[in-house]
Image (cartoon, rainbow, N blue to C red):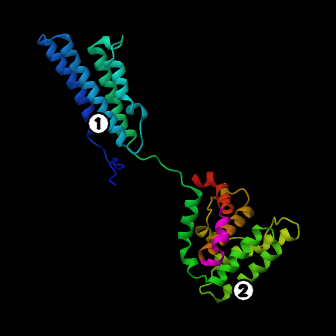
Amino acid sequence: MTNTTTPPGTESRLWIAVPAVSFLGIGIGLLLASLEFPYAVWINAGVAGCVIASFILFYQAYQKPRRDLVSLFTPLFALLILVIPNEISSGGVVVQVVFAATITFLAVRVEKVFNAPKPQEKTMKQMLNEYIERVGPLLARIDEETGHLVAQSLLTYKFGLYSNAMEKSTEALARLDAITPRPVLLERALLILRERAGGFADSRVTTNPEHVFAEEDYDDLAVRLTKDQVDDPTVLDLDNALILLYVVGIETSPDDEQALEEHQRFIIQILEGYKEKLAR
């Protein structure tokens, strides 16, 4: 299918036809009037020029990535103002000139304002997919068994089975010894999860954690904020750990892929909590 929409950043010359046709029609009408043609003949020349120009404007507006409703309705306005007899249409050439000037302004406005596509806000799902691509080198080093243990660490934590989450995290950490180079980022994420799970297992909240992400880790984390944007570093570290563990699990453990997909909303909600800050 051919896309006839004007590409963003390019300017069409079509808008020039709007003032050219409308004022040409008015000019022809005035010329006919000077030659003493009947009023009905020369006045309708201007009407015809304005009506045709309004359809050109409609076509111009329709081709743009963003639609200007006012310009799209100009043929209707031309019909109501110039064609159907009324008090306004009785204004003759003056009304035609005003109408032609108005649609000329609209044509320029459409070309300048509506030529660029409306910026679309990045969704949290898109951000998650971009993060998966960003940590691709890390994912390539993780085998299925390790990925399975990582996924189980996250899922048991999500279900509130904190003791099990600690066990699975410990098993996953043991398998990292065999990976070269050692995935330090994943190691820290597992340590963070295990420590927080241990706190919840003992019915306490970890406020001064031993395990946190290092400053050099933040380029490889999903949520990267400036220091003044961070309300609680402990919460941010846990959220980043959960997102990373989810990504590792879903990308490296086929056995857990379906279960993790069913709980993707959990990760999306974490990202949505930072939506405004990430948009800055």
Q: What residue does disc 1 label?
A: 15
Q: Which residues are magenta?
A: 252-264
Residue 240 x, y percent position in the rendering? 67, 66
- The crowd level at tag 2 (other Cα within 10 Å; few <14, some 14-19, many 20+) is few
- The crowd level at tag 1 (other Cα within 10 Å; few <14, some 14-19, many 20+) is many
| Residue 147 in view here | yes
115 and 230: which one is in front? Answer: 115
* Residue depicted at 37% across the width and 26% down the height: 76
Quadrant location of residue 1?
bottom left
> Is most of the magenta stretch helix, strand or loop?
helix
Separation of marks 1 and 2 at Cα, in angstroms: 68 Å
184 and 259: which one is in front? Answer: 259
Q: Secondary structure at mark 1?
A: helix
Total marks placed: 2
151 and 3: which one is in front? Answer: 3
| Residue 189 part of the magenta segment | no
Residue 227 x, y percent position in the rendering? 66, 59
Q: Is residue 32 left or right of residue 58?
A: left
Q: What residue does disc 2 label?
A: 174
